[in-house]
Image: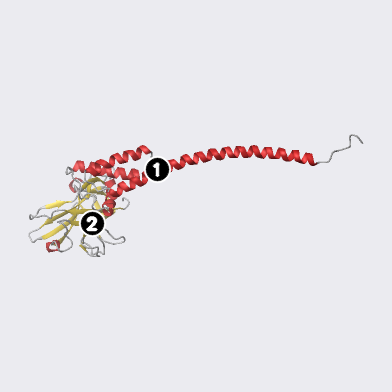
Amino acid sequence: MEKQCKKTITWTIKKLPLLRSEEIHSDQFVLGGCKWFLGAVRDLDDRLFMFLEVADHESLPSGWSIHARYVVIMTYQKLRLPISIGWKMLNVTPSVLPSGQNGTQRWFDEKCPHCVINFPLHKFAEDSGFLVKGEIKIVAEVEVLEVIGKLDVSEKTSTIMETVGGFQLHSSQVEFASHMFERHPEIASEFRPKNPTLRTGYMSLLISLIETLRHSPHKLHQSDIAEAYAALRPLTDAGFKLDWLEKKLDEISTKKEKEEAGETRVQEIEEELKDLKHKCSDLEAQLEKEKAEVSDAKSPVSFDDVI
């Protein structure tokens, strides 16, 4: 049995299935030694079926089985209200899953590699609050409790990309990028490149830049800061809104200048203090010598040699 593992996935559906039996899938993610994805399909009765499925389950070794707990919700996006619809009725704010929810547990195996639920399509009217600018946001938390069989897909070796804010990113970048979009939702609203590879490259550069600048200023060299300013230019030219990052970079640059000026002054003062201590040591020796001479001068003159 493998140790427990858990992951939270956000899937933004930009276009609902229009045709009967048309399926759409989220990007795959790795959990519990295998790949998973979320999916949606529209049926003949205008119901939207959503499902969580083990990807490539036909290629998994015979006898495999996964015991998992899952919570999947559709977030109410218009207001930050405790409203959601999904496999579990939850009190949540948009894009946030509460901790400590039990969710639903079941076994996924060769015979049944997925779980399904349907949503009435009238829930997706523009004035419903769930559909905003033609998009629906699905948040899923999946926890693998037990694995039977040898499933050895690892997140470190996997080339699976996950989508965050319209950018395909490696799994190691997803959490960081998700937090960034939560704090700065308009960051890529005017981003121009459409090519997925270029978009990934720009976002990776932005994430690397921020991770570099998060180091303490004393760990950065002036060359690092100069390179950061140089990297910022193409990012803003591409359409990223990075006023907040430029302010942080200015703040870091100022702190670095103060640090270097302060260190120079500290060295100067230390040298002055060293000289003063040396002078003090000489003066103390001279003082002791003078005290000895004064003490000798105060002593009475002996007449033992003449009387």
* Residue shown at the point (60%, 37%) measured from the top left: 278
Secondary structure at numbered mark 1: helix
Residue at the right extreme?
A: 307
- Placement of 186 over or under 104, stated as above or below: above
Pick the residue in front: 187 or 91.
Answer: 187
* Residue appearing at x 26%, y 56% in the figure: 141
Determine which quarter of the picture holds residue 134: bottom left
The part of the image, by quadrant, that contains residue 13 is: bottom left
Mark 1 surroundings within 10 Å by alpha-carbon count, few (fewer than 14), some (14 through 19), many (20 or more): many
In depth, the one of 235 and 124 nearer the eye is 235
From the viewer's perspective, is residue 9 above or below residue 204? Answer: below
Which kind of residue does numbered mark 2 sit on? Val
Type of the residue with mark 1: Lys
Marks 1 and 2 close (CB-CB < 8 Å): no
* Residue 273 in view of the camera: yes
Q: How far apart are marks 1 and 2 (CA)?
A: 41 Å
Which circle marks residue 256 in the picture?
1
**Residue closest to the eye, 78 or 158:** 78
Residue at mark 2 = 139
Instruction: Give the colour scheme of this rendering.
Output: secondary structure
Whole-percent x, y for residue 28 in the image: 21, 48
Mark in front: 1 vs 2 = 1
- The C terminus: image quadrant: top right
What is the secondary structure assignment of the residue under circle 2? strand
**Residue 123 tag number:** none
Q: Whole-percent x and y of residue 244? A: 30, 50
